[in-house]
Amino acid sequence: MNFLKDEKYHMVGDVAFTEDNILIYNIFVRNLPKSASIFHISKCFREFGEVLKVGFLGHGKGKGKGKNCFINFADPKVAAVVLQRKNFHFMNRFISVQPCKSWYQPNGQNTIQLLNGNSNDAKLLNEAACSNTSFSCEQNSLIFNLNDDCLEYICKMLTLNDQIHFALSCQRFCEIFKMISLHKYVNLNTELFATLTQFQSKVFLQIVGAQVKSLMIDFKYAFLKSHTEIISIIRFLGTFCTNVETLKIEANDLHVNKLCPIIAKMTQLKELHLNNVDVNVGLIKTLQTLKNLKCLHILDDGSLNGKHLNMLVGLEMLTLSGCHHLNSFHFKKLCENLKNLQYLDIRSCDRLKKSDYEHILKYLINLETLKFSTIEENFNCLTKLPKLKQLEITDNEGIVIAEEFYKNLAQYQANNLKELKLQELCYFNEDIAALVAKLEKLKLLGIDNDAVDDKCLEKFSVLSELEELRLNGCDDISDQGVLALLEHSVQLKRLHLTFCDNITTDFVRNALKLLQEQHDRGNRTYPLHLTLTFKAQFEALTEENNIKSSDVLKVTLDRDFKKLFNFFHDDDDDVYFDDDDDDFDYPFGYDYPFDYDYNSGNDDYYSDDDPNNDLLEHMLFLQNW
């Protein structure tokens, strides 16, 4: 049992209620002398009124210098008197008195039992209804005359807090809430608990927890909750959300040992995503017990060296992106044991060498997707992977990818490779474009480099199966060059032209005309989804009737201004996490693209020490840009 911090209770007349309006009978007493006995405690508190029960926590073995106990009073008025007494001494020692949490109060326990289906217990129903100011409902109220369809409509109009109140009113209302929640909370994010009390969180998860299949644990709102409250929510998740198949844990201050028990209870888990979580041996041993686990994604673990990962032999997908301490010794063991791997992401693993890439070729023969960063040594061996379908290469500190690599790629993967992403490239030219164009089966091509021009696009136009082209920061491509590409690439379904400054509104209008002609001739079957960087002129363009209502061209404006300063943006990461940075709410709906300290005003872009001026200058910059 845990106590409520900051005295989260309020008085109504001469009785006290928890923050959930549960009548208080039970209190916690902290910092008792270790020599204190139940007899001494009962004798002391009987001076205020009748005591029904006294019990120690943890078998009377308190942490630190004292021990803790709970006291159950027969009269809530007595409990209220004790709570309001500020200075409390017992056996010459100051002790702290707090209310027990809502679910440890008698009427809170009755309410929980009603949720479990004990609605036929008239005594429980009466006690929960009569003594609960928030969760009671007059049994002759007119709302009971409404049919279930009307009640369902009313419940859907309420906020989640009020829906929980609604569900706790009676068993019938609880069933209504269960019905509307049946599919709504299959995907659950812990941000939902930001405005809920602990009791509401417990009730909510008790109702919907079994149907949750995908869970995101993200406590970015943690400043709204105490550490004790967050730990309670974590425990509730482990207790009630046992059918989770996909679990994502975003960076937080919780030690990984707090997460191991709830992960162990999720026996159906297939995918686990960890961002900024320090993976230790205990967690890996926990993961070994999960027989259904196939996908493990670890991002930005600054301490992971790869030890013990080789024990997870059932894995088919593994991400170790940003794990800078992953070393060659443990990586080799990993490759030797995880022979079922079909997906491997080792971007920004700075300690890996040529020999490590050779181990990939030697042991991971089933690999279909590979994401890696360039190294100074030759890594041409990776072009020979026999089942490679998707390849993503991120330029690491300006290391140029040699043309020999592209030649080998064209030689060994011309009829295999489906997707190629070249991120943050520092070098690209027409000859390399010609080699890329030999990958005849490409369906997706993504390039971040301003050296891509119309001549390169001309080379890409021979890729007859290309369905998606992503060009970011390619300032040398023109309207005419992209139109020429569209004329040949009739299978193209998605075209991303973000931060390509020479693309104008004329391109969009001409593209619409071209696509319509192709559609009329029967050459084009699918509409083209075009993504452009948000600009005022493009925004006005999307409101034009012929573009807005077009069936052959769908225009989307990308407001992700982080790409302006960091071209590397992996859309696949959005599957795991919203982004790799902390999220804050900024004026005008923009995400601030710098690592910024609002307390000190320090950042990497502005010299001004005034954070308000910095933010204003940046917003003006974006508006003018």
Image (cartoon, rainbow, N blue to C red):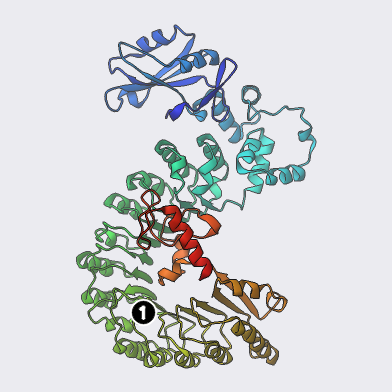
**In the displayed structure, would residue 447 be above or below residue 437?**
above
**In the displayed structure, would residue 169 be above or below residue 341?**
above
Q: How many numbered marks appear? A: 1
Question: Residue beneath label 1, please?
Answer: 425
- What amino acid does circle 1 point to? Leu
Locate residue 468 relative to residue 357 in the image: left or right: right
Q: Position of residue 28 (x, y in %)?
A: 42, 22
Q: Position of residue 477 (x, y in %)?
A: 48, 86
- Residue at the (65%, 90%) spot, across then down: 518
Instruction: Using the rendered image of the protein, determine whether residue 394 is visible from the camera's viewpoint.
Output: yes
Q: Position of residue 622 (x, y in %)?
A: 50, 66
- Residue at the (63%, 82%) spot, across then down: 526
Asked which quadrant contains residue 580, the reply is bottom left
Locate residue 370 relative to residue 239 in the image: left or right: left
- Residue at the (44%, 6%) spot, across then down: 47
Q: Position of residue 367 (x, y in %)?
A: 36, 75
Locate residue 562 relative to residue 196 in the image: left or right: left
**In the displayed structure, would residue 34 be above or below residue 553?**
above
Locate residue 126 relative to residue 251 in the image: left or right: right
Judge by depth and name the residue closer to the eye, 194 or 535: 535
